[in-house]
Image (cartoon, rainbow, N blue to C red):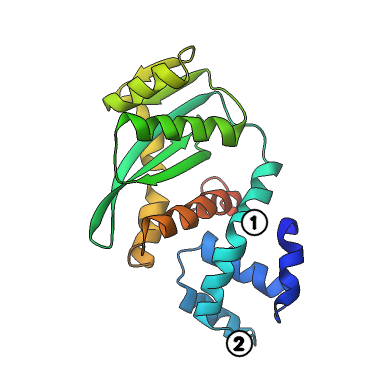
């Protein structure tokens, strides 16, 4: 969390306490209240609202720092989308992973059209700083249309059975969604999941869930 060191100066709690709370919230399926209970057992009194604000403020900086230490993503990208309920409204969660299952990016939108797919492709190119060799999607037509416009030189494979790795990558999000009893807003879901997908896999050795 070195990027946010200057921001810690106005907080009464030490950097180590804040970092521990943020890590616990993003790594394990724990609510902010449960994290507060764990810290109380260690003699640290902090409210769940304070922990929630810490996650909102420092989570993305934490994830960005980890992302910069990782090797470049693979050259085979798999894209998939699922529907999630936010305040009773159905939203679409787009996700991209490489051939090793590393999450490249997510996008929460209320549509699955060409404009949304195009925006997601461009965001992935900007965040990763690389161009894939192959893009694998399911049968959704908007992905094919956006691919031809944004990455026409990249091979595109469209087949439901080829995209199991991307589909499986949604499982940690589903688990966290249940623990949090749903997300409050599309923007809140975008912020939380962007940090969550950057932090959680880093502390999840192969074979350990």
Residue sticking out furthest to the top: 153
Residue 191: where, in percent of width, then height?
A: 49, 55
Q: Quadrant of residue 41?
A: bottom right
Above or below, 24 relative to 121: below
How many angstroms separate mark 2 from mark 1 (CA)? 23 Å
The structure residue drawn at horizontal position 60% and vertical position 49%, both measured from the top left corner, is: 202
Residue 79: where, in percent of width, then height?
A: 40, 32
Residue 80: where, in percent of width, then height?
A: 36, 35
* SS at circle 2: loop
Q: Quadrant of the N terminus?
A: bottom right
* SS at circle 1: helix
Left or right side of 41 for 143: left
> Which mark, residue 45?
2
The structure residue drawn at horizontal position 54% and vertical position 54%, both measured from the top left corner, is: 195
Left or right side of 185 for 124: right
Q: Is residue 139 visible?
A: no
Q: Earlier in the sequence, mark 2 or mark 1?
A: 2
Residue 43: where, in percent of width, then height?
A: 65, 88
Residue 91 vs residue 203, the one in the foreground: 91
Residue sticking out furthest to the front: 115
Left or right side of 160 for 62: right
Above or below, 161 relative to 80: above
> Which mark, residue 119?
none
The structure residue drawn at horizontal position 60% and vertical position 54%, both measured from the top left corner, is: 203
Above or below, 46 relative to 200: below
Q: Is residue 42 visible?
A: yes
What residue would you read off at disc 1?
A: 62
């Amino acid at each position: 969390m070195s990027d946010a060191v200057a921001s810690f100066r106005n907080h009464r709690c030490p950097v180590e306490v804040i970092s521990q709370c943020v890590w616990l919230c993003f790594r394990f399926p724990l609510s902010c209240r449960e994290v507060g209970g764990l810290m109380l057992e260690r003699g640290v009194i902090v409210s769940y609202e304070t922990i929630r604000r810490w996650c909102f403020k420092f989570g993305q900086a934490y994830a960005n720092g980890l992302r910069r230490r990782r090797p470049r993503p693979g050259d085979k990208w798999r894209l998939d989308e699922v529907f999630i309920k936010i305040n009773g409204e159905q939203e679409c969660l787009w996700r991209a992973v490489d051939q090793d299952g590393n999450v490249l990016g997510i996008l929460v939108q209320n549509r699955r059209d060409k404009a949304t797919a195009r925006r997601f492709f461009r965001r992935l190119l900007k965040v990763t700083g690389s161009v894939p060799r192959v893009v694998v999607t399911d049968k959704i037509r908007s992905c094919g249309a956006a691919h031809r416009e944004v990455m026409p030189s990249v091979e595109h494979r469209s087949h439901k059975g080829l995209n199991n790795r991307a589909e499986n990558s949604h499982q940690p999000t589903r688990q966290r969604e249940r623990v949090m009893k749903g997300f409050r807003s599309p923007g809140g879901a975008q912020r939380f999941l962007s940090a969550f997908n950057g932090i959680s896999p880093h502390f999840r050795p192969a074979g350990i869930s």
